[in-house]
Amino acid sequence: MRFSLRHLPALLGILILLISIPLSVYLIQQQQELRKMAEEIQAVTCDGNNDQVKINTAINALPTTGGTISLPARQCNLAGSIVISKNNLTLEGQGTTTILFLVDNTNRDVITVTDKNNLQIRNLKIDGNKTRQTSESIGIKFTGAGSMTVEDVLIQNIRTGIAVEGGASNLTVANNTIINTDNVAIFARINHGAAQ
């Protein structure tokens, strides 16, 4: 068989096709991996015993880019605080059937956020069990945090519902209910010039 230049375009077309198919498959796989990393979701199972440890472990397991912690539709018993230690984080429940319950004599804030940004806490219930605590507790405490949203959260039986302190800014509070508090529903102590 003789090769002529008139066969060259057809051979180049076949060669390009043979190269582009594996390359396309590779690019699709890489795109799927990037999407998975960008939408990192950690589902937490609460068994009623020191559930804050499981939640905090899931938060710490997220990549530095953040992600979502999905809480179950059941009571999570907390013998310590949930500590938001990542930026770009969503802590999300399944409505009022997701209950963050402070067990007797815990004497801690339920959720604490210090110097983190781009946070959402939504679609859950916080029960501070205040008659079984011996000191002040806060449902959600933000210190020096920014771009935060608390949405569709029921906070009850607590000394203070939400506290914002120390240079925290850009807080959106929407569609929440805060009941049965001893102090105030929402407390804000903002450094001069830091509030927005």
Image (cartoon, rainbow, N blue to C red):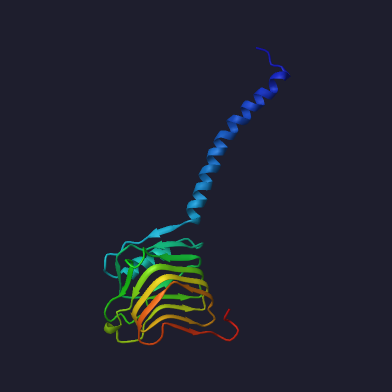
- Measured along the vertical axis of the image, is residue 150 above or below residue 26? below
Q: Position of residue 144 (x, y in %)?
A: 52, 78
Residue shown at the point (45%, 75%) measured from the top left: 113
Residue 62, quarter of picture: bottom left
Residue shown at the point (39%, 87%) measured from the top left: 183
Residue 81, quarter of picture: bottom left
On-image quarter of the N terminus: top right
- Measured along the vertical axis of the image, is residue 46 above or below residue 24? below
Q: In this view, does 58 lie to the left or right of 27?
A: left
Question: As drawn, which residue projects farthest toward the right?
Answer: 5
Residue shown at the point (56%, 38%) measured from the top left: 24
Depth order, front residue of 196/174: 174
Q: Position of residue 138 (x, y in %)?
A: 39, 81
On-image quarter of the C terminus: bottom right
- Measured along the vertical axis of the image, is residue 4 above or below residue 174? above
Residue 162, quarter of picture: bottom left
Depth order, front residue of 42/57: 42
Depth order, front residue of 148/172: 172
Q: Where is residue 79 in the image (x, y as percent from the top left)?
A: 30, 75
Q: Where is residue 148 in the image (x, y as percent from the top left)?
A: 50, 72
- Measured along the vertical axis of the image, is residue 125 above or below residue 167? above
Q: How many labels does the image show?
A: 0
